[in-house]
Amino acid sequence: MSVARRPLLTATAAGTLLCALWFVPSANATGDQGRADHSPSVVTEPQDDGRLAETGGVDTTPYVLGGTLFLGVGAGFVTLAMRRGGRAS
């Protein structure tokens, strides 16, 4: 592969990733629009007591480990790129 085509391939890969992420659904709340029964709902004022919301006990360990792994792999790629850039000069 020629060196001149590398920026084109990088731009194509980045554009493809951005287009794929466009279709990831957002986490916006739907309110009463998503309810099947049309009964009236009671709205209460939330009390701010300085605590975080209870999320139902979701175990976040896999997300933390996966994020740490990807961060480490990314740092490794940056280090590798810096080393290769130093040799080419």
Image: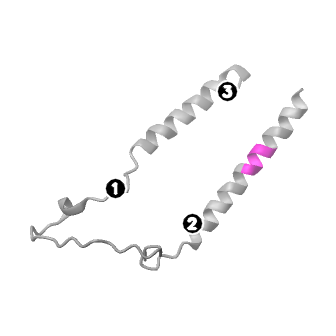
The numbered mark, 2 or 3, whose residue comes first in the sequence reads 3
Whole-number angstrom distance, CA of label 2 to CA of label 3 = 32 Å
Q: What residue type is labelled 2?
A: Tyr
The residue beneath circle 1 is 28
The disc at residue 87 is: none
Marks 1 and 3, how far apart at CA: 38 Å
Residue 77 as seen in the image, left or right of residue 54: right
- Dividing the picture into quadrants, the one containing residue 88 is top right
User: Left or right of 87: which side holds 82?
Assistant: left
Figure coloring? one colour
Q: Classify 10 Å Cα crowding around label 3: few (below 14), some (14-19), many (20 and above).
A: few
For label 2, count other residues whose C-alpha is less than 10 Å away and answer few (under 14), some (14-19) or many (20+): few
Q: What stretch is highlighted in magenta?
A: 75-79
Q: Residue at x 55, y 30 (%)?
A: 12
Q: Is mark 3 on a helix, strand or loop?
A: helix
Q: Which of marks 1 and 2 is in front?
A: 1
Q: In this view, does 50 lie to the left or right of 82?
A: left
Q: What element carries label 1?
A: loop
**Picture residue at 24% right of the left edge, 73% below the top:** 44
Q: What residue is disc 2 on?
A: 63
As drawn, the label of residue 6 is 3
Decide whether residue 78 is among the magenta residues.
yes
Disc 1 residue type (three-letter): Asn
- The magenta stretch spans residue 67: no
